[in-house]
Amino acid sequence: MTKFVKPTDKSIGDYPDFAKIAAHRALRDAGIKYDEVQHAFIGYVYGDSTAGQRALYEVGMTGIPITNVNNNCSTGSTALYNCALMIKSGLYDCTMALGFEKMATGSLTLAFPDRVSPLANFMMKNDELRKDSGKPFAPQLFGNAGLEHMEKYGTTEEHFAKVAYKNHLHSVNNPYSQFRTEYTLEQIKQSPVIQAPLTKLQCCPTSNGAACAILCSEDFMKSHGLEDQAVELLSIAMATDTKTTFESNSNMKLVGQDLTKSAAKQVFTETGLTPDDCQVCELHDCFSANELITYEGLGLCPEGEAGKYIDNNAFTYGGKIVVNPSGGLISKGHPLGATGLAQCSELCWQLRGMADKRQVKEAKIALQHNLGLGGACIVALYKKYNSNSGKVREDQTACPDKLEEIEAQEARPRFTAKL
């Protein structure tokens, strides 16, 4: 993946530039060439049709099928999900999931205001339950979900602030993160209110960036001698809305609580694992309120008890499970098409022991959660293929500064002496 940066930061170029960087890094990490990739799924939200081809043609033009996907904030993991289906079906042995986004500054807005919004029914239900506050749609929806949790379970504004405090603290050790500032709990609580109970430092920023993953069959992995570095995707599931989203009169269900529960149930049932088997998790903290209700949706704590677990530091280093060691969306950034694949990258590094200062000790099973309003939720479970080996190739690194040095060296022209 690339570093995530502010939309005004031009250091990583335009979307074909940073998509190319992410794709090359994934190929280099896998030790394969682009012409071995048989199908690519490319995710982005804010872009014209076939922007995926425009981006990937910078890497190569081999004539492979390229499918563009858009599933709101779960777009990157939707590309991952489709790659996994292709491998599982036996149609392909090697696929690429690439996600990127070039965003505008400020809150999310509609790209096509001249037609019915895909979120129109969500906002109508939100207005029925809480009334329109006049604030941007995303903080309204998730802030109101937080209010419902407070009313139902006695959660406090400080609990939401503690979630953001944790993620900002984690991001200090992530060189890919858009923001790497450590804040006090008081600073987070006193930052400007965006939509009660959410303050500015509890909301994710808009971002530019890209991330990429290579998915292959077990036979392909073995034929390329990748057993010691491979991470196995144990299970991946997607869930979309059911009637309960609108009929339950719940702000929490309106933002995907039931989707999370459904997708999580699928992956834990398929693998026979439980949330207690997981040591590290990257989940969709677009707002601190969503991280808190997702703890319960994923089964990381009993329903209604997230506040108690937060007070006991259950979701950071030394606790029950480390959630968002990357800093999460709140601090790492949220380029919509790349987010799900950035989560995948972080969890692969954690399972390989490559996460440097943010490394989770004894990370064996990793859990991913990526949510898009409108809606779609993807949950996945990972483990290292060869759990008895910590071996990673000597030329591999997860440090972006080192990767940039390597890329600069490879880009230098080579001269040969002539007699």
Image: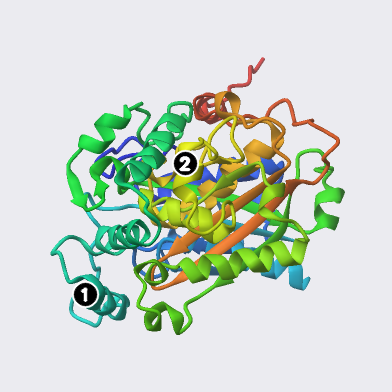
Q: Quadrant of the C terminus?
A: top right
Q: What x and y, as percent, mark residue 406?
A: 57, 26
How many residues crowd around disc 1 within 10 Å: few (fewer than 14), some, or many (20 or more)?
some
Instruction: Give the mark nearer the N terminus: 2 vs 1.
Output: 1
At 66% from the left and 47% from the top, the residue drawn is 366
Picture quadrant of residue 270 = bottom right
Q: As rendered, which of 293 and 259 lies closer to the eye?
A: 293
Closer to us: 104 or 270: 270
Residue 134 at x, y = what percent?
13, 64
| Left or right for 355, reference 382 | left
Q: Is residue 1 visible?
A: no
- Name the residue nearer the viewer: 366 or 142: 142
User: Distance of mark 2 from mark 1, alpha carbons?
Assistant: 30 Å
Residue beneath disc 2: 310
Q: Which residue is farthest left?
A: 134
Identity of the residue drawn at 17% across and 42% down: 192
Local secondary structure at mark 2: helix
As helix, strand or loop, the secondary structure at mark 1 comes to: helix
Tag of residue 127: 1
**Which residue is rendered at x = 27% and y = 57% of the image?**
139
Q: Are marks 2 and 1 in contact (CB under 8 Å)?
A: no
State whether residue 264 appears in this view. Answer: yes
Identify which amino acid the numbered label 1 is placed on: Asp
